[in-house]
Amino acid sequence: MIVCRSQSEIDKLRRVNQLVARILAELRQVVQPGITTADIDELAERRVREAGAEPAFKGYHGYPATVCASVNEQVVHGIPSNRPLVTGDIVSIDMGAKLDGFFGDCAVTVPVGAVSPQATELLRVTEEALFRGIDCVRPGARVSDIGAAVQQHVEAQGFSVVREFVGHGIGTALHEEPQVANYGPAGHGPRLSEGMLIAIEPMVNAGKPAVKVLSDGWTAVTKDKSLSAHFEHTVVVTRDRCEILTLLPSDEARARQLLAGRVVSGGDSPETEGVRAHT
Ligand code: MF3
Ligand code: CO
């Protein structure tokens, strides 16, 4: 069953998702050569708790940290460690939190100093693919329309989409129905309707799509050791389209560009056409 949330539930979901987005924005600022992913995790947990929230991943099926920090060929679920980041690395930082009974979830991949042209391209295409997926979200659309749009964009740029992990519904649990694959034909799966929440999270490899999980039981890496990137936003279906709950007001202009000219208004009018950022 896919839950449709009430306005007051959506208000709470907006609060926790904005909190996650704000903390993630701070984390990306501290990414630089020499910092370890354990340092990033420590800062993340401190900020989550200062806000009166709880880390959503810590303890989830035994996951040991507040963030997942996945470097280079690591795809997702990298466990923070004392390995210092070096110039040229890319690091995906994925974070979830729980506040007042509701969950937020968001991820970005960040370059460490100057990175290769291939890495730059991979980050650009993965974030664009996320927004191609977001662009499909509206009442009446089918869940698989999202993955079809993601896959189309990624493969047209010569990269590949990871099959083993999917996006998801989110609300009073971190993972709810439906599953949101990042590949496959459009026109299948449940229809979206107003009040549904989904976390869309494409994982894109520079090489082949195959991944494997390391012996730590968590870290997913590309089998061919190619670079991998991951971006995630949590969105709620609105009457017209959707609102990106993890989009900060300061990132609205960028989102507008990524949506290729579609309207992104921060106004509080629910009548506004287009994908709205929260302000
Ligand atoms: N954003 C990821 C997901 O939704 C992160 C989960 S990490 C875990 O699957 F530790 F919580 F599993
Ligand atoms: Co997620």
Image (cartoon, grey):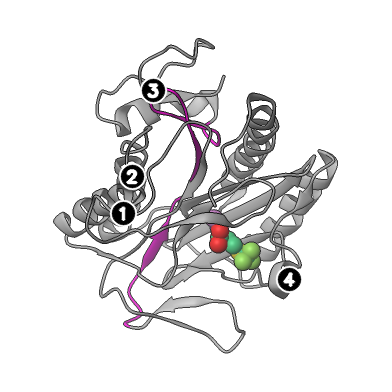
User: In the image, which disc is placed on residue 64?
Assistant: 4
Q: Nearer the viewer, mark 2 or mark 4?
A: 2
Quadrant where the C terminus sits is top right
The alpha-carbon separation of the residues under discs 1 and 3 comes to 20 Å
* Quarter holding residue 174: bottom right
Is 199 placed left or right of 101 in the picture? left
Residue extending farthest to the front is: 1
Please tell me whether mark 4 sits on a helix, a strand or a loop: loop
Disc 2 residue type (three-letter):
Gly
Q: Earlier in the sequence, mark 1 or mark 4?
A: 4
Q: Quadrant of ligand 2?
A: bottom right
Alpha carbon distance from label 3 to label 2:
16 Å
Which is nearer the N-term, disc 2 or disc 1? 2
Can you identify the residue that label 3 sits on? 240
Q: Mark 4: which amino acid?
A: Pro
Query: Percent position (x, y) of residue 229?
Result: 40, 60
Residue that appears at 40% across and 23% down: 253
* Label placed on residue 107: none
Q: Secondary structure at mark 1?
A: helix
Q: Nearer the viewer, mark 1 or mark 3?
A: 3
For marks 2 and 4, the one nearer the N-term is 4
Q: Which residues are magenta?
A: 224-247
Q: Earlier in the sequence, mark 3 or mark 2?
A: 2
